Image (cartoon, rainbow, N blue to C red):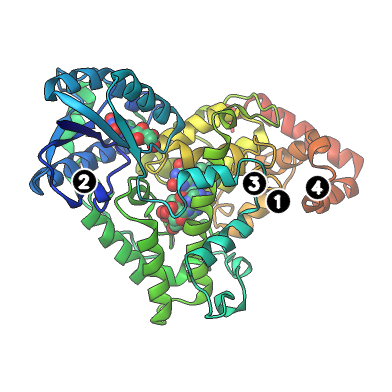
Amino acid sequence: MTCLRLILGDQLNARHSWFRRVDGEVVYVLMEVRSETDYVRHHAQKVLGIFAAMRRFGEALTKAGHRVEYLRIGDERNRHSFADNLPWLIEQFGAARLERMEADEWRVEQAVLQAFDASGLPNAVVSAEHFLLERDEAATRFEKKVPRMEFFYRDLRRRHQILLEPDGEPRGGRWNFDAENREKWPGDPPAPAWPWQKHDLRALWEEIDAAGVQTMGEPSAEAFGWPLSRREAQAWLRDFIAQRLVHFGRFQDAISGQSRTLFHAGLSFALNLKMLHPREVIEAAVEAFERGEADLAATEGFVRQILGWREYVRGIYWARMPGYAELNALNAKRPLPAWYWSADTKMACLRAAVGQSLALGYAHHIQRLMLTGNFALLAGCDPDEVDAWYLGIYVDAFEWVEMPNTRGMSQFADGGIVGSKPYSGSAAYVNRQSDHCKGCHYTHTKRHGERACPFNSLYWHFHARHREQFGRNPRLAMAYRSWERMATDERAATLAQAERYLADVDAL
Ligand code: FAD
Ligand code: DLZ
């Protein structure tokens, strides 16, 4: 009795219990399909990376003795969706049973669930054995009331016994070292280069191109950098622990024109494809702390991202979908400026953030939140467009993690489910955290007039036009007080400047 087991492109978990035993009656199915390459315009490196990693995964399973059916993008038999390929695969293998892992994305979960049910065969769904909180528990827990991230995170630290004293209290007497993690990076200590690979993926790129898949950004197929197997991902993890963890906390919120990657881990692609398990990443950081190679602030700051934020946004996604994708609390309608696809803007910080996103399929968290995200928020860009851009451009972008970060944390379109206030910042913030303002076409100290930095007038315009929503928010009280203290003609000139900028955002 043959059983088909479906493996999605972001389910490359070599340590899943499925693979512990070789069973001649099980056929593992992987498919490169247009339903997944086309639901949004992806970065070329994202499609290349997912396909190359899927192919390596399929080959490794075959080598380990498993039966594998791998459908390439150019395969003539390929009908380009999970639902359309399943019926002929069932027939070809005479399958009597279907199995799958839980999908991480709502759209895909619905599609495969329906396809499995439509087959009429007995079928089962199992955990992807990746997250630290199972999907159903996360969804149930967040269904009625979403806890603040901090309390959720403390709870997971207790549950998984991470960085705790024997009496259950946090190591160092505090749960949170965020206050120590906000330094600007002066260029020293030097930021170590990431351990980019040099995979030659030109043949695969030709296949993708020949199939007509539309992408954005640079493929860099001749020397493709991202890790493509568990072994390579483990090497990236070791490199991060040895080279960058030590300064991760201090410079976590820094932005610099001198380094695109600073002390960040670069592990999100490997984690989200499930080549690495979050537990092993957390354990590696905690072990480095125990060996005295990183201090508590750096280690806790890193653990918080993975055990806290990553699991938290997934809980929100699964508790609130599909409605979450429709939320637009600030009624934002503006199209995203054209330079989000070209980096052709005079704003130095945004030129760098968009430019590196197109080149690498990567920007670090503060670039995503306080540069591209902040601009879209202040300008009032449509969250559907903002979501589509973030979901496409980053190699690590999968909707379960992209959407609560974008629509929620960054755009406040969820009305405050993820964060209690919008992440808005003026040029003062950008100048405090980065070295971009110095050589910029715009002047970071000016609110209006020639070459006034757009972040300033847009910041005040945003707060003025959303006074009803945010005027009584205690976390924004200081901003509104400053606005009130400003002279009337200064306020008028600032708002008029913002209006001029908003009338032609493509020209900024
Ligand atoms: P590091 O800064 O080194 O952090 C370590 C790890 O912590 C990351 O690999 C990631 O797994 C996890 N992490 C850190 N912050 C978050 C967070 N806010 N949410 C979830 N996990 C987090 N992350 C994605 O994985 N996919 C996305 O599509 C995505 N979209 C984002 C969109 C916006 C608007 C914002 C503000 C953030 C987004 N993030 C996303 C979160 C974060 O920016 C990335 O996880 C991070 O930049 C990945 O790079 P890194 O591995 O070098 O991370
Ligand atoms: C993102 C993506 C792309 C571009 N292509 C494929 C594919 O051809 N086959 C596949 O199985 N998965 C792909 N993926 C990942 C899926 O979209 C992913 O499984 C869902 O987003 C669920 O998280």
Quadrant position of the C terminus in the picture: top right
Of residues 32 and 338, the one drawn nearer to the viewer in this rendering: 32
Q: Which element type, helix, strand or loop, lies under badge 2? A: helix
**Cα distance, mark 4 to mark 3?**
18 Å
**Cα distance, mark 2 to mark 3?**
43 Å
**Cα distance, mark 4 to mark 2?**
49 Å
Is 331 on the left or on the right of 94, as rendered?
right
The CB of the residue at mark 4 lies under 8 Å from ligand 1: no
**Cα distance, mark 4 to mark 1?**
26 Å
Quadrant position of the N terminus in the picture: top left
**Cα distance, mark 3 to mark 1?**
39 Å
Q: Which element type, helix, strand or loop, lies under badge 1? A: loop
- Label 4 sits on what residue type? Asn
Crowd around label 4: few <14 · some 14–19 · many ≥20 (10 Å): some
**Which x, y percent locates residue 391?**
45, 35
Q: Is residue 380 visible?
A: yes
- Label 3 sits on what residue type? Val
Label 2 vs 3, first from the N-terminus: 3
Mark 3 lies on residue = 146
Crowd around label 3: few <14 · some 14–19 · many ≥20 (10 Å): some
Q: Is residue 364 visible?
A: no
Circle nearer the viewer, 3 or 1: 3
Q: Which element type, helix, strand or loop, lies under badge 3? A: loop
Instruction: Name the residue rendered at 74%, 34% in the picture.
Output: 497
